[in-house]
Structures are given as structure tokens and as C-alpha cells.
Image (cartoon, helix red, strand yellow):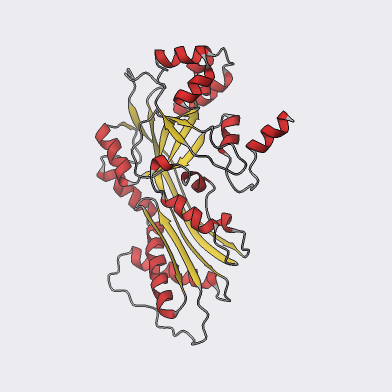
Amino acid sequence: MGDFDTFDKLIPLDPDLPSLSYQAHEQVPVYIPWTRKSLALGTGIDISSGSSPGDVGNLTLRPSAFDSKFNNVSLVFEPTNATNSFRQAESSSTASSYDHMDAKFRVSASCGFIGASVQGEFAKTVSENRDSNKVSLQASLRVGRIGFSVCPGLSSEALALLRKSPSDFDRTYGQYFAAALFIGADTTTFLSTSSSMNLRSEMKKIEVKAKILWIKVTVYKENSESESASSAYDVTYDGFDTLSAYQHHARATDATGYAALKLEAAKNLSGGIGLVERVKEVLKSLGLDDKETMVITEKQLQGVFNSGAVAEVMFLPYAGLRDYAAATTSTMPLASQLEKELS
């Protein structure tokens, strides 16, 4: 029975929901979408509370278990092979909302310590959407990461507690620690309806408007095509943009409301079209180059958080560190593998 009880706790009832308990059990990296809230690398996090099926948990921060002096350890911005994706999703089911969002967005909604997350609010709203027809355009960009120059060592106090009681270590410092900040941004423009409206066609019109807005045409004329008096309105718009901390929800039931909804959606979509340029401009304003590795200052780090350019934080398990493995006489392969994530 014990094995089945453990299985039930680890595997969510809804396969589209992330199970942090399962990730922690497997000791794999955990990625949490972020906000503008500052976070010191090395900070611990308690994942143990996410134990019920389908529950991402009530995650809480813990003190860092690392040596506070961080001797010979710097923070480094390292460009990565820029990954830029622009994807359209369509669905025709009341229960298909997960096609239009990253499962990780649900995790951020449970992280009270990071404040209101535009991804989390978007995920909450869209997951409750019961319209039968849905379409979305999603843009995502990662250009680099900020992490330690070398993996720091655990403090003498943390090591002493770990040798005495690993469970006490977990309660004090958590099971994971903040290992790296991934730099970039995410944005999604989502439409839904249960009417006979052709959402794909409507999204194409909005995309045209968005491209016009992005090239900074200041005088914008609404499409002059007339709407039939019998046109069916009942359209929902949801959108978010992590770089501008934007999240919006609206529903239109008449022509005037729909015109305003389309313009709102086009403005958000234009930000997604220009995501690469926007992120590069932010980095440039902070003295960072998306093609150059460099040591960063505390002022630059704070600027990165304030700008909204921290798209997500990677947390790694303490159990993957050599210090932890040596103190608990664990095997070393996991430590070697996970410390590569920091190098």
C-alpha cells in the first residue's frame, strides 16, 4: 500500500498540471516563471508542501545553505543560443485550455513569495475558460542566463546540520536552491468564443494590425468593413506580456466592445512580434550584450529584475551537490550531473 500511496501523491490527477512533488522526487531541475521581484541566487525553496495530486503546492523560500562569503564566486551573465519561438494554437473543446499555455505558468500562481504573476493570472483565467473555440499566438524568447561563476560550497552550519539530520536540513533550507536566472520574455494573445465566429480569420486580422503597430505607424485607421447587424459577438480576450508586466482579460458582447477588444489584442501581439528587439534593448540599457559573457554587478542584477527580463528561475536540488553527497555518503553521479547545470 505504501508504494501506491506514494504514487498517488506524486502523480497529478490531471496530466496537464505540473507535479512539483514528482519533480522533487526525481531530483530534476525545477523552472519557475518569475516576476520583477528580486531573488538572491542560492536562496532555498521548500517544495515538500506540494504533495496532493495535481497540486503544485504552496512553495516557500528558505535561507541559503551556502557560505555567505561566496569566496571567489561572481555572478556571470552568459549568452545562450537564443531560442525564439512564435506559435499558433487552435482548439475546439471546452476542456482544451492547456493547449494555449505552458504548464509552468500554473506553478507561478502558487508562489506567493514572488508577488502577482502575469503568467499565473493568465493561466488561472484561461484554465477556467469553457468556450468551445479557442485560438492563441504565443511568443517566447530566451537569450541567456545569470548564474554563479563556480558552484559555491555549503556553509559549515549547513553541513553540520546535514550530517546530523538531512530532514532537519530540508526543513531549514528547503530541498532546492535558486541556481540560475533565465533571461528573456514570454507573451500570449488568446481569443475564445462559443459563437459561430471564425476565430482564425479574426486572429489574422488582429495580427495585421499588430504588425502595423509594431512598425510605429502613429495614425491607425480601423478596418472599414461593416459588420452585419446579425453578427454574433461573445468573444473573450486574454493576454499577458512578462517584459511589461501586462495581463488583461476582457469580454465583448457588441460591436463597440469587440472593436476595443481587437485593438487591445493587437497591442499585446505587437509586443510579441517585437520580442527580440525589446529584450535586446533592455539588456543594452543595463550594459549587457546578448552575445558577450561578462561578470555583472549587483546594480546590474537589480536592473535585470526591475526590467522584467528574468523570465524564469532554475532551481536545483541540494542533493545534486558534491558537498551534500559527501556529507550524506550518497553516490556521486547525480552530483556530477547537476553541477554541470551550474557551469
**131 to 79, vertically: above or below:** below
Residue drawn at (62%, 65%) of the image: 92
Spot the residue most to the bottom: 229
Quadrant position of the N terminus in the picture: top right
Displayed quadrant of residue 179: top left
Q: Is residue 141 visible?
A: yes
Residue 207 in the figure: left or right of residue 287: right
**303 to 190, vertically: above or below:** above
Residue 230 in the image: state x and y as whole percent: 52, 86
**333 to 296, vertically: above or below:** above
Residue drawn at (37%, 18%) of the image: 67
Residue 79 in the image: state x and y as whole percent: 39, 37
Residue 244 in the figure: left or right of residue 61: left
Spot the residue most to the right: 1
Q: How many marks?
A: 0
Q: Is residue 86 visible?
A: no
Residue drawn at (34%, 44%) of the image: 36
Residue 205 in the image: state x and y as whole percent: 46, 72
Most foreground residue, 310 or 45 = 45
Residue 157 in the figure: left or right of residue 217: right
Most foreground residue, 303 or 108 = 108
Quadrant position of the C terminus in the picture: top left
Residue drawn at (47%, 40%) of the image: 32
Residue 108 in the image: state x and y as whole percent: 46, 45
